[in-house]
Image (tube, rainbow, N blue to C red):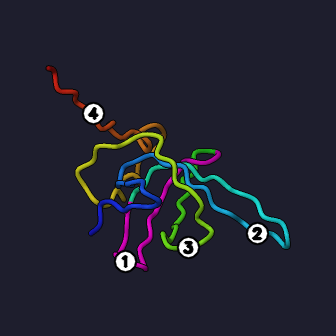
Amino acid sequence: MAQFFIHNDITVNVGDTARVHEEISEGDKKRTQIFEGIIIAIRNRGTGQSFIIRKIGANSIGVEKIFPINVPTLKKIEIKSRGSVRRSKLYYLRERIGKAATRIREKSTFTKAA
């Protein structure tokens, strides 16, 4: 079970809140669509690796999307906040409602005192 992957020199972990920029082509036009949510799972290794990202959409409906990592339409991944979780798959968030579905502890950063 993978708990992290590296995409364009950015380490992405399970539990992070991320913004995924995906290029969508409609006919001869191209646009960038942004999907923001919590990374709840990372599957496989190597070239077949993918991750699942979940957000709470309109009317409190959960929306999940699976992104393969090695696909050319995946342009950029931005990490908004780092999450501190103890599991590699956060499927338990699917049963939660409201704010509890998006509440994950922030990863604390310690600075060493001189």
Quadrant holding the C terminus: top left
Could you tell me how far apart the alpha carbons at marks 3 and 4 are, in whole angstroms? Answer: 32 Å
Q: Residue at x 54, y 63 (%)?
A: 65
Which label was assigned to residue 108?
A: 4
- Asked which secondary structure carries label 3, the reply is loop
Q: Earlier in the sequence, mark 3 or mark 4?
A: 3
Residue type (three-letter) at the residue carrying disc 4: Ser
The answer to whether marks 3 and 4 mark residues whose Cβ atoms lie closer than 8 Å is no
Which label was assigned to residue 71?
A: 3
Q: Which residue is mark 2?
A: 25
Q: Which residue is mark 1?
A: 46
Q: Is residue 28 magenta?
A: no
- Tell me residue 52's x, y (percent): 46, 63
Magenta-drawn segment: 41-58
- Tell me residue 39's x, y (percent): 43, 55
Give neighbour class at mark 1: few <14, some 14-19, many 20+ (Cα, 10 Å): few
> Considering only vertical position in the picture, is 2 above or below 56?
below
